[in-house]
Structures are given as structure tokens and as C-alpha cells.
Amino acid sequence: MTTNPSAELLDNLLTATGQTIAVREEVRVWSMSGVERVTFPDGTTAIFKYAKKPFDCEDQALRQAQTLGVPVPQVHASAVLDGWLGMLLEDLGPSVREADDLDGVAAAVILHGTRTAPPLPVLDKERLRTLPARALEHLGRLRKADRWQDADDVEDVLDRIAQAAEARSAGATIAPFGWVHSEFHPTSLHIGKHGWRLLDFARAFTGPGLLDLASWHGTIEPPHPVRLRAFLEQYVTAGGTPDALAPRGGLTAENWALGWHRMWAVEWFMEQAIRWIDDPATDPAYIKAVRRHLTDVLRLLEI
């Protein structure tokens, strides 16, 4: 397991920006990334964010977003070391309030209205359709490692979704199709005294913008198609494409979006379990989340 090289990364970034020393203060730190506020001798501050693969291209996404006119924090400097990315970002200071649904649709309309950024990975119909099959591959690897042994039900459900995926993934490229933030939650929208900025672009990709709108209300509560429908209507009123309301894959836009967002999350959880986190101690929590989401997928995608 690579030790976290944040001290060395910060040294490189300080050198790049002409600073010599900084006082570090943790804001939020977990096994794969960290956010700290650093204070320089003259009293000015910046945000130091570091993350390991697969979160190590966020600097490119942020710079691209800024070029395309999306309000994001400015990247002062970035550096990569042993598979870890470090960035010094503009410190936006305290937020003046939490983001609400109208802030969310305003941000989504601007993001989805930009040109697609070429370096971003693509999630089109073909890629969407293969998500259940990819999740089954992760399950196979987990079982080879003597993990997830009591998860036959997970395998059965993924098989059923894989069989329905061809039909249900239809309409993936109906607008809005383009830049997807993928961590689109109220906590990713900073509202300061000088306006809003969109944060956390580490997993941005090109794909169906409906996945962003489906993620806004989070995945802790059960999925709520009626609430998402209202949110989609607000999005269209705010200038988003009217196609956001169009049915796809034989489903309403809101059921399609919530169902595929949950399936996308399942594949990501299972990849994390075997590849990025790879810690058997986390298996019970991951299995529980996967089961819950798969139950939602069956219902929402009407399988």
C-alpha cells in the first residue's frame, strides 16, 4: 500500500508557486484523498487537495471547465507523484448558505450546455449497457479472492439486469448528453458571497446529463421519481434542453435516470471493493449498499 505522499506533493506545489512554507489544517481526509486549508506566511490561504488513482485527473477537468466558462475554483498549481495528484486551489472561503434545487438546476444547465471535454472518459449506450456485466466481472474477482461468498442473490440480480440492459439503455445519447459532473450533490456546489462555484470534478465524464440530475438528491434516501420529475421540469424551465423530459429505454426520463444512476453506482462500488479500496473489512457495508441499490434498479428499470 503506497504511503500518502502529501507532504512531498505540497513541497512541490509550494516550490511551483514561489512559496516556501505553509501551515496545514485538515478539512476532510479519507483513505483515497484529502482536503486541507494551507496558510502562507503573509496570511493568505489556499486549498490543498490530494488524491490517488482513479481521482488523479481532476486538475485537467477543472482547467478544462474553467476554459469552457463553468464557474470552478481556480487551479494555482498541480503535480503528480507516485500515482497521487496534488493541487493548490483557490480558497473560496465559507459558504453563505447551502445550495438548493434552483441552484442545482442553474449549475447543471451551464455545465451540460458546455462543449464536451475531449480527455473525459465516455459513457455512451454501449458502455451503459455493459455496466451489469462489468459488475459481474468485479464479483468474479471478489469471489476468487474468497470474498462476497454469500452474494448469490447479487449475481442473480445482475444477470437479470444484464439481460434487460440492451433494451433499457436505449436513449442514452438523447440530450442532455455531454459533460457529466458525476458527484453532483448540494455539497459540490459552493455558494459564497461572490456567487457559486462547482467543486469535485474528480470523476467527471462524457455521458447522459440525466445521471447528474438523478444524483442531486443523493442515494441515502430511497429514490423518488416524482421529486426527480419536478427537478427535471425546473431544469427545463431554467434553460435546460426539453429533451431531458423525453422517455427513453421504454421508461419515463426520471425512472430511466434513477435506475441507471443506481446501476452506475453499483458497478463503481464493486470496482472500489476489489480494485481501489480492496479491503475485506469493508465488504459488509459494500454488499449492503449494492443489494439496496440493485433492488431499486429492478423496480426503476421495470425488470
Image (cartoon, rainbow, N blue to C red):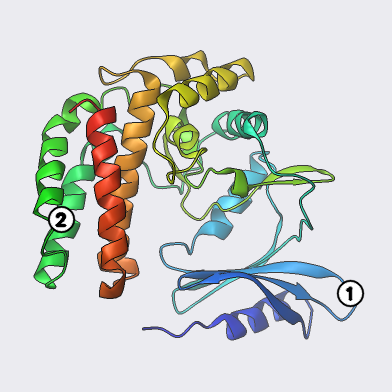
> How many C-alpha atoms fall within 10 Å of the one at disc 1: few (<14), some, or many (≥20)?
few
Q: Residue at x 33, y 26 (%)?
A: 256
Residue 28 in the image: above or below residue 204: below
Left or right: 5 with respect to 221? Answer: right
Specify the quadrant that holds the C terminus: top left
**Between residues 266 and 204, which one lies in front from this camera angle?**
266
Q: Residue at x 61, y 15 (%)?
A: 237
Instruction: Name the residue carrying label 2.
Output: 137
Instruction: Name the residue carrying label 1.
Output: 43
Q: Mark 1 vs mark 2: which is more N-terminal?
A: 1
The residue type indicated by label 2 comes to: Glu
Q: In the image, residue 202 lies at what x, y percent?
A: 50, 56
Residue 238 in the image: above or below residue 204: above
Left or right: 46 with respect to 175? Answer: right
**Between residues 159 and 74, which one lies in front from this camera angle?**
159
Specify the quadrant that holds the N terminus: bottom left
SS label for mark 1? loop
**Residue 74 is drawn in which quadrant?**
bottom right
Residue 104 in the image: above or below residue 146: above
Q: Is residue 123 visible?
A: no
> How many C-alpha atoms fall within 10 Å of the one at disc 2: few (<14), some, or many (≥20)?
some
Q: In the image, residue 250 lies at what x, y percent?
A: 25, 17
Q: Are marks 1 and 2 in contact (CB under 8 Å)?
A: no
Question: Residue 228's mark?
Answer: none
Q: In the image, residue 10 lies at what x, y percent?
A: 65, 79
Q: Residue at x 13, y 57 (%)?
A: 151
Q: Is residue 61 visible?
A: yes
The residue type indicated by label 1 comes to: Gly
Left or right: 20 with respect to 254? Answer: right
SS label for mark 2? helix
Q: In the image, residue 108 lies at what x, y percent?
A: 58, 32
Distance of label 1 from label 2 (alpha carbons) = 51 Å
